[in-house]
Amino acid sequence: MRLGRANLDRLAPRIRRPAYDRARVTSGIVHLGLGAFHRAHQAVVIDDCLASGATSWGIVGASLRSPDTRDAIAPQDHLYTVAVRAAEGTEHRVIGALLDSVVAREKPVALVERMADPAIRIVSLTVTEKGYCHTPQTGDLDERHPDVVHDLNNVDAPRSAPGFIVAALARRRALGIAPFTVLCCDNLAANGHTVQRIVTQFAALRSKDLGKWIADAATFPCTMVDRIVPETTDADRDAVAAALGMRDAWPVMTEPFTQWVVEDRFAAGRPDLAAAGVELVADVKPFELMKLRLLNASHSALAYLGYLAGYETIADTMQDPHFAHLAAQVMEQAAVTLTMPAGTDLSAYRASLLKRFANPALRHRTWQIAMDGSQKLPQRLLGAMQDRLAKNLPIATHALAVAGWMRYVTALDEQGRAIDVRDPLAGELAALAREAGPVAERLAPALLGVTKVFGPLGAEPRLREAVTAALGRLYSQGARGAVETLVSA
């Protein structure tokens, strides 16, 4: 038996399900990037909003490329399960906030029309850092990106997230419809401001007037999102089926912790997010930097160095006390670069992160976190390194994390086996690695010269020295040895 609207009443009483009549719910949000994170995070919040009576805020999900999610959940009336895993057990909840789904590549014009519908008041995004077609170091649109070039020549049938947003806003402007709010939920620095800059730059390439109208009339709130959501496996599907008594083709696994901090700036209204646990604030930046530099930075350090050391998951990596110490050290050294609002307890936050990383019920693969590192390093690691250098503080811990990324993108592990590197710059990085060879004094400068990642910081002598030394230790001692040497110093 398959999960679906007709079978909800057959679920065991312990399984939570939508506490509202889905037949009365209408769409108010289009979400670009219908992946596991959105379904375990924002969609759960909207599900709570719908349960409180805000029935005009259902979600239409759009996968920009792959039909896999649509094909899995459409036959289930877009119902799916969130399995919240903790050491003491798993709780299951069926989410009903997603009303429909589309695949952008199949029907781009239809998606633009959906986004131009006056009923849609928020367009939210989780397309990962690489989905914005920008240069991470500058935050500007990459005008030479193939999808940008395509979208400027096919304005009504775009491929990229910025292309869809601009196409829909242009149509709304032509029809006299007010713009929607663009709500970025990805780990970009100052994500709302960055996406506004990318979108208005793209729009200005079509028409300066369009770019100005979007800049003046649309809103792009900054946000900070936090919940660990591993990739769903076949074993996860089997476990959820056993709990539900029916099959769910694409459940999502997550942890008990969840956080969403949002700048309260919406052009066309919003549901009562605060009632669903969202923190509405005037300035998100301190919380964003806190998460990027404490959680995301230590996650990346564990991912690259843990993968090289042979650990499959973050929880496995955290069982090694040297790696647990490494994660704590990354957080501690980044904390001095932060200026937080009064009352923020960074020590408690760091302790909660270490506990979350060690959750044995959550199998978050190091390989999954290691994806798209060229897009993530500037926000997660390089900003803190730059700030520490400005304070004349050592950067050896962060340098080892960067060196771990460098060793990883050579696409060969410590045993000489191939690494399946998933990164927009994978080809370029691998070519530089082949030319430099496994010699830290050649490889580190070659990769530090990739300005799309490092910008002018790559030429900073103290950074070059620290990263080169760390990479040398990785080659001479291996990841385990290099981490042990660092944390024991």
Image: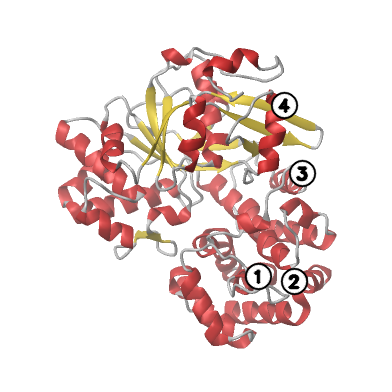
Q: What numbered label is drawn on residue 479? A: 2
Would you identify the image quadrant in which residue 214 lies?
Answer: top left
Q: Residues within 10 Å of mark 2 (few under 14, many from 20)?
A: many
Tell me: residue 328, above or below residue 412.
above
SS of the residue at dot 1? helix
**Mark 1 in CB contact with mark 2 (< 8 angstroms):** yes
Q: Residues within 10 Å of mark 4 (few under 14, many from 20)?
A: some
Q: What numbered label is drawn on residue 16? A: none
Q: Residue at x 55, y 80 (%)?
A: 433
Q: 120 or 99, which lies in front?
A: 99
Q: CA distance from mark 3 to mark 1?
A: 23 Å
Would you identify the image quadrant in which residue 125 lies?
Answer: top left
Circle nearer the N terminus (2, 3): 3
Label 2 sits on what residue type?
Answer: Ala
Question: From the viewer's perspective, is the residue at label 4 or at label 1 nearer?
Answer: 4
Q: Outermost residue, front direction?
A: 1
Label 4 sits on what residue type?
Answer: Ala
Tell me: residue 75, above or below residue 200.
above
Residue 312 % position (x, y):
73, 57
Which residue is the site of mark 1? 404
Would you say 4 lies left or right of 241 here?
A: left
SS of the residue at dot 3? loop
Q: CA distance from mark 1 to mark 2?
A: 8 Å
Q: Quadrant of the C terminus?
A: bottom right
Tell me: residue 298, above or below residue 17.
below
